[in-house]
């Protein structure tokens, strides 16, 4: 399996993506990542899934190596950019989707934007916290201080990011891999609230409009209860509980995720 990196175009400029596998008996699988990360986090899962299908993992606009929009576009705005990118790549037939955390909402919006094209969709960690918690998180995102000349805002974020990504990592994840995740997330800290504004203002009633079959592939992580609550709003959903997993799932158990996704997607 050879993974390649390239650009397509979207309404915000260049849209970076990773790709592996070839078109064949199965529809292409499009992966959408969490915030603040990039498609890089998916590389182990890309390798596992690309054995029998084409896999495309976009960097969300403003993340990784994709051009940024001029202002926070919301989940639908990001999804529209992915639709642009797929069209520019000539991917106009059936596709499957997988989204993780923020990427779960991006996948939902892409499925709603392309209802005749999205065949099946896997989701993990749908961030539907109770309404009061989402409102508080939205206020925090909207009022977050802009970076200052002495670096206090960014240095505080970096300290917290290191504590969460590196020090609190699953012990099965190597230190070099954790440091690379830290660097990937740190790249966007000057605008990391942009995607979160879309997450915390999201209208979760839109989950009821999904027409394709959905799999909630859910580790026992912090977002498990919010994800299960969100699953109750999705008309055609199956739930696969993964009690042996918590965080850093793409590094420590890509084969488990690939097996479950392949069983669902076919």
Image: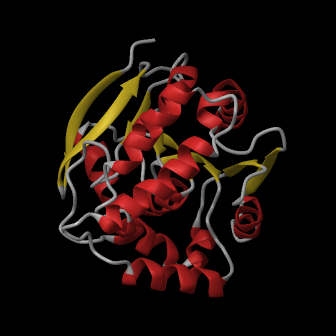
* Horizontal side, residue 186 vs residue 214: left or right: left
Q: Is residue 213 above or below residue 1?
A: below
Residue beneath the point at 60% across and 69% down? 207
Identified at 34% across, 58% down, the residue is 189
Q: Position of residue 16 (x, y in %)?
A: 26, 40
Query: Relative to 1, is 146 above or below?
Result: below
Decide if residue 34 is in sight here: no
Q: Residue at x 71, y 59 (%)?
A: 222
Residue at image location 43% in from the left, 34% down from the top: 180
Image side of residue 186 versus residue 55, left or right: left
Place of residue 257 in the rendered image (x, y in percent of width and height, measured from the top left): 68, 33
Q: Is residue 215 visible?
A: yes
Where is residue 211? Give x, y as percent.
60, 61
Residue, far left: 13
Left or right, 12 with reference to 239: left
Q: Quadrant of residue 142?
A: bottom left
């Amino acid at each position: 399996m050879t993974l390649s990196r390239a650009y397509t175009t979207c309404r915000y400029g260049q849209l970076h993506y990773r790709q592996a596998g070839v078109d064949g008996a199965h529809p292409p699988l499009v992966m959408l990542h969490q915030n603040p990360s990039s498609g890089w986090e998916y590389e182990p899962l890309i390798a596992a899934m690309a054995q029998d299908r084409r896999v495309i993992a976009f960097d969300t606009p403003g993340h990784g190596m994709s051009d940024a929009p001029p202002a926070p576009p919301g989940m639908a705005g990001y999804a529209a950019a992915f639709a642009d990118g797929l069209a520019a790549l000539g991917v106009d037939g059936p596709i499957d989707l997988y989204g993780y955390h923020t990427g779960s909402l991006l996948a939902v919006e892409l499925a709603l934007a392309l209802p005749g094209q999205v065949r099946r969709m896997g989701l993990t960690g749908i961030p539907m916290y109770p309404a009061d918690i989402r409102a508080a998180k939205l206020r925090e995102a909207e009022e977050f201080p802009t970076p200052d000349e002495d670096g206090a805002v960014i240095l505080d974020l970096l300290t917290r990011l290191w504590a969460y990504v590196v020090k609190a990592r699953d012990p099965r994840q190597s230190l070099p891999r954790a440091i690379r995740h830290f660097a990937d997330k740190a790249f966007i800290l000057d605008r990391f609230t942009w995607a979160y504004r879309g997450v915390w203002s999201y209208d979760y009633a839109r989950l009821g409009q999904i027409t394709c079959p959905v799999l909630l592939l859910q580790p026992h992580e912090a977002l498990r209860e919010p994800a299960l609550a969100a699953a109750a709003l999705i008309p055609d959903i199956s739930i696969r509980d993964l009690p042996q997993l918590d965080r850093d799932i793409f590094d420590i158990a890509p084969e488990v995720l690939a097996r479950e996704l392949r069983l669902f997607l076919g």
